[in-house]
Image (cartoon, rainbow, N blue to C red):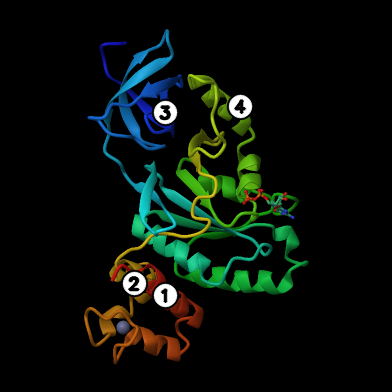
Amino acid sequence: MTAELIPAKVITSYGSHGVVRTESGILLECRYRRKIGRPFCGDNILIRANYTAAEASLEKILPRKSSFYRGDAQLHKHAVAANLEQIVIVVSPWPEPPVHLIDRYLVAVEYLQLRALLVLNKADLFDKYPTASAQLQSQLGYLQSLGYPTLETACKGAPGTTQLEHQLQDKCSILVGLSGVGKSSLINSILPEKEIQTRAVSEATRKGTHTTTATTLYSLPVGGEIIDSPGVWEFGLWQMPGVDIERGFIDFDELRDNCRFSNCLHSHEPSCAVKQAVEAAQLPTSRYESYLQMLELFSTE
Ligand code: GDP
Ligand code: ZN
């Protein structure tokens, strides 16, 4: 092992070990140590390296800029990645997302204090599914007016994925969405080297295996990174205090100060500015319904 500490990044992480990449691009299998803790995919760490044996030991986990969680069946949260900057929410006209899914994802994005990018994929199928497409375009149009960047893509034909590539450049992103909306297809189109990188990770593990379901960090040819975590956020999120759910609806920001009660949760309280905005059609009913449903399903109170 080298005497000096070397900076590296966690590419994939298992229980007691992982694969890490040094700044010069060398992949090493890294053993964790109980007293230092367990790092996640995307963590910046310090290691001691044995280049001849292609192995390393974890010496320090550097401070995280962000943590990314998944929810389990009991709605508890578990960290799966570190230092993500952008969550790409992928939807398509077929399969169509359940009504409240996008709003729910946005609450999680706000909770994690990350940037959201909304992607409507399968633009080539708009003609085939006119009702679902128009509904999604209108929903995304409203969210764009709130400041969330949105774009349309197609893995097959126009408009392609060039704009998405620009949005991913020089950032660390993750794609979330229902199964079948085209996440793998989008990743394959912007990351033609995915298989090569996967193979390199497999070779760096002692047993020469790497499951395709393991959360893994890939480097993009345009600069930046994609963390692929198959199935993540496909079903549920996690429980959080009602006030965090409330903060996740950024269109409430300019309303909540006008509610009679400073701790108004906009459900049964009188003189509520959010309810008045819904009645005056200034706030879409669907957003308010998403909110009430989340309070009921995901609030810890
Ligand atoms: P994932 O489950 O979200 O990773 O979705 P996949 O990438 O596996 O895609 C599911 C199906 O949708 C596959 O049959 C893809 O070929 C298809 N698909 C993906 N993107 C597009 C697209 O832009 N247009 C059309 N027509 N089909 C697509
Ligand atoms: Zn209120």
Q: What residue type is labelled 1?
A: Tyr
Q: How far apart are marks 4 and 1 (CA)?
A: 43 Å
Q: Which of the 4 image quadrants contains residue 59?
A: top left
Kindly state the secondary structure of the residue where label 2 is placed: helix
Q: How far apart are marks 2 and 4 (CA)?
A: 43 Å
Q: Which amino acid does label 4 sit on?
A: Ile
Figure check: 34 above or below 292? above
Q: Which residue lies furthest to the top in this view?
A: 52
Residue 196, numbered label: 4
Q: Do the residues labelled 1 and 3 touch (CB within 8 Å)?
A: no
Q: Distance between the residues labelled 3 and 2?
A: 37 Å
Q: Mark 2 points at which residue?
A: 246
Q: Do the residues labelled 1 and 2 touch (CB within 8 Å)?
A: yes
Disc 2: CA contacts within 10 A as few (<14), some (14-19) or many (>=20): many
Q: What residue type is labelled 2?
A: Glu
Q: Name the residue under label 1.
A: 291
- From the top left corner, tell me how far across and down residue 248 is, in percent: 37, 67
Q: Residue visible at 41% across and 37% down? A: 41
Residue 193 seen: no
Task: Return the disc, 3 or 2, that comes first in the chain's sequence.
Answer: 3
Q: What residue type is labelled 3?
A: Gly
Q: Is residue 110 left or right of residue 96?
A: left
